[in-house]
Amino acid sequence: MNPRSQLCDAREWTAKSLDDIGRWPGGATPSKGNPGFWKNGQVLWVTPKDVRGATVVETADKLTDSGARLLNWYHAGSLIVVGRSGILRHTLPVAIVSHPFTVNQDLKVLVPHESDDTIHHFVLHSLLNREHELLGKLVKAGTTVESIDWTTFGTVRISWPPRCERKRICEILETADVAIRNTAQEVSKLRFLR
């Protein structure tokens, strides 16, 4: 096979708004007064406190099936964005959730308009790369807590290469992320041994 046939034409890059890429629905909080929604729950219910890095594997609170039926369910591998939290003063919390899940009202989830396994990771890296610029553009100060202006959020444009290029970029970035995590673990071990 000709190696050039696997390369994408760089001229095919465009720009897309976040609303052009997909819908951004959210979630809710089922009544905390109803133990049937919460007790012994197994369904991930993601809230801002669960977003501590680029991946969410576990949540502090879980819903029962009856509680989760009240909300939208989202696929494993979906991208979430925290839209209301004090952390927005300095950080744009975005992550990929590794298992099927629901969210509360303070988060939005990317539901792409097209089926493509590169979209969530590519948008994640695009948002993280422009974190400080986006915080200045999107965050509005609330009376008690900062929040994202979702109307403005939807108009944010990101560079949009063809699928083969998005896949290649994501593979490179994921490899780098693994190397960074491994190095951080080694440093942590060395500090402990010291």
Image: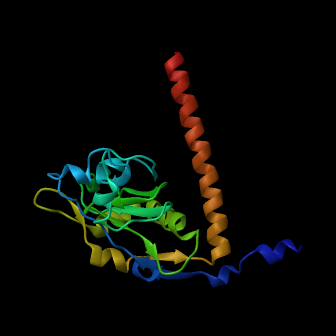
Residue 121 is at least partly visible in this image: yes
Q: Which residue extends farthest left?
A: 143
Q: Position of residue 74 (x, y in %)?
A: 42, 65
Query: In which quarter of the view is residue 66 placed?
Result: bottom left
Residue ID at (67%, 65%): 168
- Coordinates of residue 147 in the picture (x, y in percent): 23, 63
Please, which residue is most extreme toward the top here? 194
Q: Is residue 55 left or right of residue 10?
A: left
**Which of the 4 quarters of the picture holds residue 144?**
bottom left
Q: How is the image coloured?
A: rainbow
The answer to whether residue 130 shows anywhere in this view is no
Q: Residue 1: horizontal and vertical position, in percent?
A: 89, 73
Q: Is residue 7 left or right of residue 125?
A: right
Q: Is residue 148 left or right of residue 132?
A: left
At which x and y percent is residue 57? 45, 48
Q: Is residue 185 above or below residue 100?
A: above
User: For this view, does 52 lie left or right of residue 183?
Assistant: left
Residue drawn at 60 percent across, 81 percent down: 13
| Residue pictured at 26% horizontal, 45% vertical | 39
Return the residue nearer the eye: 139 or 171: 171
Q: How many marks?
A: 0
